[in-house]
Amino acid sequence: MASKTDFTPEEWQTIGLAPIITGLYISMSDPSGPIGLIKETFASASSIIEAAKQPDALQIVKDLAADMEAKTLKPELPKFKSADEAAAFAKEQLTKAVALIEGKSPEDAGAYRQWLYDTAKKAAEAGKEGGFLGFGGTAVSEKEQAALIQIAAILGVTPA
């Protein structure tokens, strides 16, 4: 089972950025205003902490949660000029993160891939799309559902 010590600081930042990227990918697919963006971003970040509490959690996730709580994990996102640029960045970073895990710990790769997808799904479900002042709307919009399918394809998992 891989842990933080198996990766260089740069590799660790890539791995730590991946769950945040899934939320960004969802948010960029169907922007829902500042409150929705905050909810989706918070859902991505909190999924790290929540997953780490599970008895069968990957050591990688536990290490990410410890770094988040200690505020030593500070993944930085570049400024994007368009949603397409953000999507291309997300695809590249998710692919890199999965490749890093596969290279160091192939036995963890499937669970890591699934965890990233689950993180994206939580982000998609975090903020209602459409509606007015919090009334009406839908939990996951068609555009977010399409983004989840794209993330599943990038990660090589079956969308739920």
Image (spheres, rainbow, N blue to C red):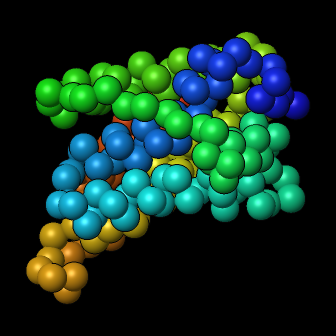
- Name the outermost residue toward the front: 71
Q: Is residue 59 above or below residue 96?
A: below
Q: Which residue is at the front of the view, 97 or 156?
A: 97
Give the residue at the far bottom of this rendering. Answer: 135
For the point 22% across and 82% down, which residue is it? 134
Is residue 83 toward the left or the right of residue 65 in the image?
left
Picture residue at 74% right of the left edge, 54% below the top: 52
Residue 129, x across and y down, in percent: 22, 67
Q: How many dots with numbers?
A: 0
Residue 45, position in %: x, y? 52, 53
Left or right of residue 31: residue 1? right
Q: With respect to residue 100, does 149 lie above or below?
A: below
Q: Residue at x 55, y 24 (%)?
A: 14
Name the image quarter holding residue 54: bottom right
Looking at the rendered image, the quarter that the N terminus falls into is top right
Question: In the shown orientation, is residue 150 left or right of residue 156?
Answer: left
Query: Which residue is located at x 61 percent, y 46 percent?
Result: 71
Quadrant of the rendered image containing residue 98: top right
Q: Between residues 35 and 121, which one lies in front from this camera angle?
A: 35
Q: As drawn, is 105 to the left or to the right of 110?
A: right
Query: Is residue 159 visible to the viewer in this orientation of the structure?
Result: no
Could one spot residue 139 in this view of the protein?
yes
Q: Position of residue 47 (x, y in %)?
A: 58, 57
